[in-house]
Image (cartoon, grey):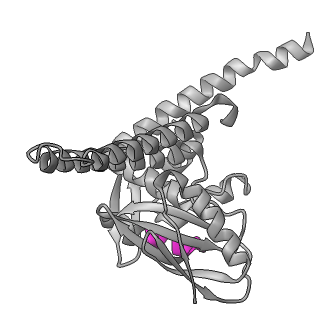
Amino acid sequence: MLKKHKIFTVWQADKEARYMTQMIHQGNVLVRTTGVTETFEATAPRPGTVQLDYQLDADVDDYLAITREAGWELLTDYPILNGKWLYLYHPDEHARLYSDNQTKIELLQRLRNRWTIFGLFCLIIALAILVPLGFVAFSFILPLVLVIVYVINFTCLTRQIKRLRSPLKN
Amino acid sequence: MTETAFYILLSLLEPRHGYGIIQHVQAITNNRIILGAGTVYGTLKKFRQADLIELVSATESKKKYQVTAAGRQQLQREQQRLQELLNNAEVLNHAEKA
């Protein structure tokens, strides 16, 4: 068992997928993730691709039925915000979960909306707790960090959406 | 309507499940279009919300969908648009002959 510690961020899902693909090519298959700790099992090096997708809990079973038939294998999932990040492996390196720009854009828009609303919710809760305390020394740091993280998330996902919308990409 | 969305809706003139759509579109486009599972699932969900398709049968692991009357109308409008595109592109043939 190999354990790696790193923070997975929503706007870097494609980078995470490329990393998982490299790992499986080297014979390390992901078996569990908690968002900060990824556990790999040693196996024979496998060709192919690992891709990430996010689906709501209500959609996961129906979606996985299609992916299974299309040759994808679910390595593991990571539950968050009434949905799951799905780590899917396909032995064909050219296989894609999203074969056109429009549906990829729609996925990124869903991720952006969901995480931005969650960020705002966290900010409101943080302020609701801190304001009555009179913003004691350094207590502004938590809301500030939340704002920075979710603004970066929003900006990066918007940039990815714009890139996909570029006429040169269509 | 994108090419992908058109082909998915067109596939559902007959009842089909998700992977059946992928196979059908691959066959009628001579392997040019291989739809991704995420693309198919997201589009089916959108079509259901817009009442362009309906669920016609469901087992534990497979759900079959088919176009509704509204979906068929949408396909016909798209066919007219594509026909107009093709007619207007005829100018290319005339330009080559001249």
- Classify residue A150 as left or right of residue A76: left
Q: Residue furthest left?
A: A132
Q: Nearer the viewer, residue B3 or A10?
A: A10
Q: Nearer the viewer, residue A160 or B56?
A: A160
Total marks shown come to: 0
Q: Where is residue A65? Give x, y as percent.
A: 45, 73
B95 in magenta: no
- Classify residue A20 as left or right of residue A144: right
Q: Which residues are magenta?
A: A63-73
**Relative vertical location of residue A88 with respect to residue A102 in this rendering, above or below:** below
Q: Nearer the viewer, residue A136 or A47?
A: A136
**Residue visible at 13% across and 51% down in the picture:** A129
Question: Which quarter of the rendering shows the N terminus of chain A?
Answer: bottom right
A64 in magenta: yes
Q: Is residue A67 visible?
A: yes
| Residue A29 picture quarter | bottom right
Question: Which quarter of the rendering shows the C terminus of chain A?
Answer: top right
**Residue visible at 83% across and 20% down in the picture:** B93
Q: Nearer the viewer, residue A160 or B57?
A: A160
**Relative vertical location of residue A154 with respect to residue B31 in this rendering, above or below:** above
Q: Residue furthest top?
A: B98
**Residue visible at 26% across and 44% down in the picture:** A140
| Residue A116 picture quarter | top left
Q: Where is residue B7? Give x, y as percent.
A: 56, 47
**Residue visible at 70% across and 83% down in the picture:** A27
Q: Is residue B47 visible?
A: no
- Classify residue A21 as left or right of residue A154: right
Main SS, magenta residues: helix
Q: Where is residue A134? Give x, y as percent.
A: 12, 43
Q: Where is residue B96? Give x, y as percent.
A: 90, 16
